[in-house]
Amino acid sequence: MILEDNLGAEGDSVYAALMAAHEGLSEAESHALNARLVLMLANELGDTTRLAALFKAARDLA
């Protein structure tokens, strides 16, 4: 599990693209977009054990 910055100089560009994807959406639409992104990224990763660990870590950080 990588918790330190892994995007380097591209981090700001990724954040800007994410914010642009949310632009003009209602709060409910933004939540739905985030849910779709999580599922799409989970599918890209494709490792259910790692995903379970990441879900737990994200919950523990809340």
Image (tube, rainbow, N blue to C red):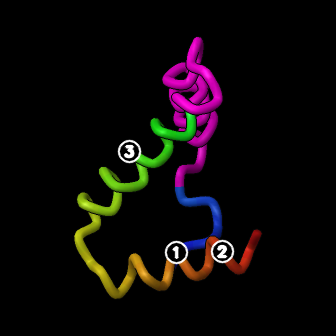
**x%, y% of residue 57?**
61, 79
Q: Is residue 55 above or below residue 27?
A: below
Q: Quarter-wise, where is residue 58 in the image? A: bottom right
The kind of residue tagged 2 is: Arg
Measured in 3D between alpha carbons, the distance from the residue under mark 1 to the one under mark 2, in whole angstroms, is 6 Å
The kind of residue tagged 1 is: Phe
Write down the residue under mark 1.
55
Question: Is 47 contained in the magenta span?
Answer: no
Q: Quarter-wise, where is residue 9 in the image? A: top right
Q: Secondary structure at mark 3?
A: helix
Query: CB of mark 3 within 8 Å of CB of mark 2?
Result: no
The region drawn magenta spans: 7-29
Query: CB of mark 1 within 8 Å of CB of mark 3?
Result: no
The kind of residue tagged 3 is: Arg
Write down the residue under mark 2.
59
Q: Which residue is depicted at the point 61% across and 21% down?
A: 26
Write down the residue under mark 3.
36
Q: Is residue 10 above or below residue 21?
A: below
Question: Is 10 contained in the magenta span?
Answer: yes
* Label 3 crowd (10 A; few <14 / some 14-19 / many >=20): few
Going by the image, does 3 lie left or right of 40? right
Q: Secondary structure at mark 1?
A: helix
Going by the image, does 33 lie left or right of 56? left
Q: Which residue is depicted at the point 51% across and 76% down?
A: 54
Q: Secondary structure at mark 2?
A: helix
**x%, y% of residue 62?**
76, 69
Q: Which residue is depicted at the point 59% across and 49% down?
A: 8
Query: CB of mark 1 within 8 Å of CB of mark 2?
Result: yes
**x%, y% of residue 27?**
64, 29
